[in-house]
Image (cartoon, rainbow, N blue to C red):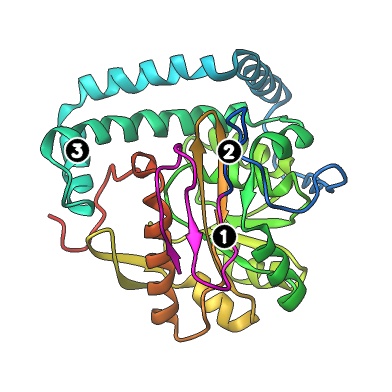
Amino acid sequence: MIHGAESATGGVAIETMPGGAARVSQPDGAGVSRQRAAPMATAPVAAPNQSHSPPPAVIRSMWGGLAGTARALGWRRFLFSDAAAAVFCLARPRRVAECANRHRRADPGLAEGPSHARARASYREYYRTCLDLVWAHGQAPERVRRLHPIDGWENIERARAEHGAGIFCLAHFGNWDMAATMALSRGLAMSTVMREFRPGLFNQVIVWARERRGLEVFTPTRAARGLVDAVRRGRFPALLVDIPEGGRTVEVRFRGGPVLFSTAPATLSRHSGCPLLPVACFRDGRHYRIVVDTAVPPGGVGEMTQTVADRLEALMALAPDQWYPFNRVWTDEP
C-alpha cells in the first residue's frame, strides 16, 4: 500500500510499505529524476502493430507533420493548449464550477477559491494531454527512456518472471497514452481496449497512432477474448477502470463517494493468475513519470477492485490537478 505521497514536482513523491518497490527517486542536479529501472541503453522496443484500417496517407502525413512541429516547439507547445483551455473555462463557467465541486468533494479541505483554481488547472492539464497524443507520435524510444522515468519497474519484472504477465490498472488521470509510450519504449508488449470515437476518421487516426507505437488495440466487443489471449502471449493489458464503457461493474469507495469501477481487470486476474498492478502516469515538471505500485493481493472481484481504487486514489494525490472530473463521477451525484 502506498503512503508518504508528496508533491509530484517537489522531490520525493512516493514510498511503499515494506516489500513494495514503487518508490520515486530523488531528482538530480538538472531536475530530471534518476530512474530505478532496467538498463536503458540496450532496452528493446515494442514492434509496431499492423493497422487493419489505417487512415488515408494524407492524414497520416499531416499527423506526422503536427507531431514534428510539437516536438520542435518543446515545452512551448503548451502555450497553444493552455490558451485553448483558458478560452473554454471563460466560455463555460458552469462546467468549471461543477468540476470545482467535485474536486472539493474529493478533497474536503479545499476551499472554494482553490477548488476553482484546481478545476481550471484540470482543464489545462487535460488539453495538454490531448496535445501530447500528437507530440508523442514518432518520439525516439531512447529519448523517451532517458527523459521519462518509470518507478517500480521491478514490480513489472516480478510479474513477468512469476506469472508471465501483469494487468495494469489506470484511472482517468495524467496521461495514459504517454504511459503506454514509455512502457513500449522499454520493450514491454501491451494491449488495451478502446471505445470507438466519432467521426470514424478520427477513430482511425487514434487507433493507427496507438498501434504504430506497438500497442495492441481491441474494441469493447472483442475485448474479453482478446485480453485473455493477450496475457497468454505474455502481453500486459492496460485498462482504465474508473469510467467503464460497458460490461460488469462493482461499486467502490473512491474520491469521497461511491463510484462504479469495471470488474474486468479483477476478473481477468482471477482467470489468468496474472497480478493487478495499479499505475499512474503524470507530468512531473517538464517530464512524465510512471509509478507502478506493488501487486494487489488475490481475493474476490469486489475486494480486489476496492484495493485498486484505494491504490489509485493514493497515486492521484501526487498530482491532484491532473485528475479530470468533468462529468458525473459518483453514483449518488445528481
Upstream in sequence: badge 2 or badge 1: 1
- Please provide percent x and percent y for residue 101: 16, 44
Q: CA distance from mark 3 to mark 1?
A: 29 Å
* Mark 1 secondary-structure assignment: loop
Query: What's the mark number on residue 115?
Result: 3
Query: Element at badge 2?
Result: loop
167 w.r.t. 65: above or below: below
- Spatial CA distance of label 2 from label 1 is 16 Å
Residue occupying the point 16% across, 57% down:
333
Q: Amino acid at mark 1?
A: Ala
Q: Residue 307's x, y, as percent?
A: 41, 73
Q: Is residue 13 magenta?
A: yes
Tag of residue 27: 2
| Depth order, front residue of 231/146 | 146
Foreground: disc 3 or disc 1:
1
Q: Which residue is mark 1?
A: 22
Residue beneath the point at 61% across and 26% down:
135
* Dot 3 amino acid type: Ser
The mark that comes first in sequence, 2 or 3, is: 2
Identify which residue is drawn at 77% across, 47% down. 49
Q: Secondary structure at mark 3?
A: helix
Q: What amino acid is found at the position of numbered circle 2 in the picture? A: Pro
Which secondary structure is most common in the magenta stretch? loop
Pick out the residue farthest to the front: 29
Residue 171 on image: x %, y %: 43, 54
Q: CA distance from mark 2 to mark 3?
A: 29 Å
What are the residue bounds of the magenta stretch? 1-24
